[in-house]
Image (cartoon, helix red, strand yellow):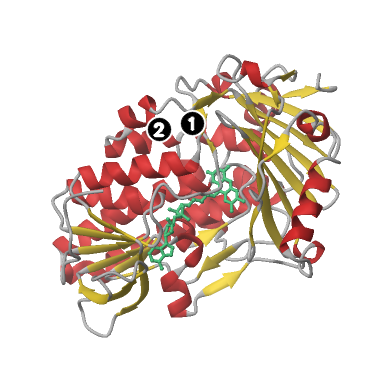
Amino acid sequence: MNAFESIPESCDVVVIGGGPAGSHVSTLLAQRGFDVVLLEKARHPRPMVGESLIPHFWKFMDMSGVTPKVEEAGFLSKAGGITVWNGRIHQFSFRTFGYNRPALHVERDVFDHILLKHSASCGTQVFEEINVTGVDFSDDKPVVQYSSLQGDSRGSGRIQCRYVVDASGNSTVLAKQFKSRQLVAGKRTFLGMWGYFTGNNFVGEDGSSYGPESVGKVQPVTFISSHEDGWAWHIQLRDKVSVGLIINTDRVKRMGKKEQEAYFLETVHKIPYFRELLAPATYLEDSMAFRPDYSFYSTKLAGKNFGCIGDAGAFVDPIFSHGIQAALYAGSMCAWAAESSLGRPDRAENYGRLLQTRLRQHYGFSRSLALGDYGGDGVDPALVIDLMKSMPLVELEMMLVASDISNRSTNFHEMARQAGFMEDDFAQGVMSGKAKVLESLNV
Ligand SMILES: Cc1cc2nc3c(=O)[nH]c(=O)nc-3n(C[C@H](O)[C@H](O)[C@H](O)COP(=O)(O)OP(=O)(O)OC[C@H]3O[C@@H](n4cnc5c(N)ncnc54)[C@H](O)[C@@H]3O)c2cc1C
């Protein structure tokens, strides 16, 4: 990854985890001249789910300067989304909103590796196969403890630093240490379960299906359908399709891996339209994986010398493909907070509080968008309303349209109304003018 061979004993900032959040924050801080060490448990490229990117993500690529490398990778551009939700079919295209850069379907192993290598090229010292086991905050300077997963000479060790960023994703290293992780379940607990197929058909913007020979010629949409126990996605990639189910945990919790896989295959082949799209497809053996403890948030997201960003701070149902851009947003905010705290240690507590508020605000937005009908754990409506008033209008418009396709939008719409965005003209223009209702699909 880079020329650094031994892990230093001290530095300015330690970043735990090299997913999109960790790579982004470390890039920004290294570019600002800080001595940054990133410790990553896996060796990249490593497998990861979450392949659908909404167009807002480009602004973060521009911010870190990685745009040319992402463009060069040649990921599949997608046109928009089609959803079948409780029998209603909606279609929307990103260009209707005025986006002039494409949304993408990315192989996450490739995409995440590009961001991590970019961070290293900007000066971050990246060490892979290093597992962070905890952080000692008893001194003003945190001490990060780690062990090598390779059993090599690096063994286990400690790094003293001035600021720690937890970007460890679902591992939530600091939230577990702080015991601040809350599961967002309401009355039901969900899990995500996914696998990959080749030789499948996919859905284009016009609602018709296309065969594998059209990949790269016809832009796919992210195709979503509700089913009796949750919802499902179909995300076309360059050489395979990612298909996933969000389901009630009770369905599979007593099953072994083989039974779960059989359940997954049977269920995806039963969902209308998925059945037809997958009819000619071959399942990639053993590709099924799942994510339990589905939605959560941490009540302690930042302090004077730490920030928890991306999935390490909170995770919500990914129905609107918000996860990566939320991770990148949090990375940008955290870079600002870390730089400010290191520059003015006397004001570090304040910057910590500001970061906590910004992260909660953004989380509250994603949370009320995705899980709008489950109550509002961890959501401060006043913060979400403020964010709606200050975010780029095109982004809010797209999220309002997206929120109208499921039955989860009540809270979100109420907050948009309080922010002044659900007046008749705006609501009608956005909600009906920018999403089409289709009678059926030609699949
Ligand atoms: C089923 C599912 C579908 C999704 N679909 C989408 C989608 O379509 N679009 C979208 O935008 N988002 C989607 N998401 C969400 C998206 O994948 C995440 O929000 C995103 O990966 C968050 O990035 P991150 O950097 O915070 O975490 P991650 O990408 O999880 O990266 C964390 C990194 O930390 C490393 N790590 C973990 N523990 C340690 C440790 N102890 N020490 C050192 N390193 C450690 C891991 O190896 C990993 O590389 C989906 C998520 C799920 C579960």
Q: Nearer the viewer, residue 269 or 186?
A: 269
Vertical relation: 338 (above or below) 99: below
Q: Which mark is residue 126?
A: none
Q: Nearer the viewer, residue 153 or 242?
A: 153
Out of 210 and 284, give the one closest to the viewer: 284
Q: Residue 353: x and y, percent? A: 35, 67
Q: Amino acid at mark 2?
A: Trp
Callout 2 secondary element: helix
Where residue 159 appears, x then y in whole percent? 21, 73
- The quadrant holding residue 190 is bottom right
Where the C terminus falls, by quadrant?
top right
- Is the residue under label 1 in contact with that under label 2 (CB below 8 Å)? yes
Relative horizontal placement of residue 11, taking residue 248 as reference (left or right): left
Tell me if mark 1 has few (under 14), some (14-19) or many (20+) residues whose alpha carbon lies within 10 angstroms of its own. some
Whether residue 435 can be seen here: no
Q: Is residue 202 visible?
A: yes
Amino acid under disc 1 = Pro
Q: Is residue 364 above or below residue 397?
A: below
* Separation of residues labelled 2 and 1 (CA atoms): 6 Å
> Which residue position holds label 2?
58
According to the picture, the residue beneath numbered tag 1 turns out to be 55
